[in-house]
Structures are given as C-alpha cells and as structure tokens.
Amino acid sequence: MGISGQIITAVSPQARMDRDMTPFDPSDGQALRNAFGRFGTGVTVITTQTAQGPLGMTANSFSSVSLTPPLVLWSAALQSKRHDAFAQAEHYCIHILGADQRDLANHFAGQGHDFTGFDWTHGTSGAPELTGCLAAFHCERYAVHTAGDHSIIVGQITHAAASAGQGAGLLFDQGRFGTFAAQG
C-alpha cells in the first residue's frame, strides 16, 4: 500500500522501456546527448577576470550543492579553449539568465573575450558581473574534479544577489532556448 492507501503495482524497468522508450547504447555519444537533452535546464553565463581581460562562458550544467557552506557546481568540457582559465580561476561569477537574455547566452557559447555591447561591472571578487541577470553568485574556487571529458568546478559562494522582479528564467531543452509555461 502507498502512503495514501493506494495499491502500488510494480512494473519492471524493461517493461516500461519497451512500452515507452527506445533503448540505445550509452556509448553512442549522439544518442546519449539527445537523451540528456530531454532534461530541461536553466542557462547561466560564468565570468572570470584573466590576465588578458574578462572571460565568459555559457553553461547549463549549474547546480546547487550545499547550503552550509554555500556551494554550487558547474561543468566545463576539457576540450573547451576556456576550460583551463575557469578550472584555474580563483574567483568567478555565475549569472542566472532571464528569458530575454538569449543573445547573451548565444554570444558566450561561441566566444568569451568580447564583452562589447553588454553592461557589466567588476564584482566584489573582481570577476565581471553582468547587469540585468536574474541572479549572480560570486564564488571562490572550492574544488575541481576531472570527470570523464569534463571538469566539475565547485565554488563557494562569497556574495550573491537576485533581481527584485519575478522575471522568467531562460531554459535550454532539446537543443532550443525557451521559457517555463505554467500549467493549470
């Protein structure tokens, strides 16, 4: 019996998979990428200050880790030209993008050194802080872990701010940007 008194019938994972999904070989990178794409995520831009100037990178691998201490993580591909700068950065800022910031996400997905046309200031840690985002988390490096073809970058939040408004977040799902649509 379930918590509410309902009878719960177990269905084997294979029966569910046969009925609802098409199995694939997890070593098939494109099929795996497509399956991961079914998990809609928020979109962030991570920024840091380097000897060559400000640097940014779009990431949708952001997640909270701990409240005490306040920790967050995100992942950077080892093959990314910006990987080493972020994996070695002592400080960086994670920006939660609003639904109207698709251009910002696309820009920093392609390249990271050109901040022309985007309003920003030096944040509390020296990392660039983009204006107009839904939230910003200034972090100092806590840990970096190599995991397959990515590094998991864990940061301890040293300063955080959130917009006073209720703006919708920019989401990424199945290779497309969008927003959340509330149902009923």
Image (spheres, rainbow, N blue to C red):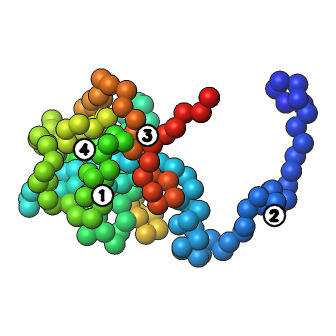
Residue highlighted by disc 2: 18
Residue 155, percent across and down?
32, 44
In front: mark 3 or mark 1? 1
Query: The C terminus appears in which quarter of the rendering?
Result: top right
Of helix, strand and loop, which one carries label 4? strand
Q: Give yes or no for contact between labels 4 and 2 (Cβ–Cβ under 8 Å).
A: no
Q: Which amino acid does label 1 sit on?
A: Asn
State the mark number for residue 106.
Answer: 1
Which of marks 2 and 4 precedes in the sequence? 2
Q: Which amino acid does label 4 sit on?
A: Cys
In front: mark 2 or mark 3? 2
Instruction: Give residue 123's quadrant in the image.
Output: top left
State the mark number for residue 93.
Answer: 4
Q: Is residue 129 above or below residue 149?
A: above
Of helix, strand and loop, which one carries label 1? helix
Residue sitting at x 31%, y 35%? 134
Q: Nearer the viewer, residue 141 or 75?
A: 75
Few, some or many C-alpha atoms within 10 Å of disc 4 (few <14, some 14-19, many ≥20)? many
What whole-number distance in Å separates the C-alpha atoms at marks 3 and 1? 23 Å
Which of marks 1 and 3 precedes in the sequence? 3
State the mark number for residue 141.
Answer: none
Disc tally is 4
Few, some or many C-alpha atoms within 10 Å of disc 2 (few <14, some 14-19, many ≥20)? few
In front: mark 4 or mark 2? 2
Residue highlighted by disc 3: 64
What whole-number distance in Å separates the C-alpha atoms at marks 4 and 3? 14 Å
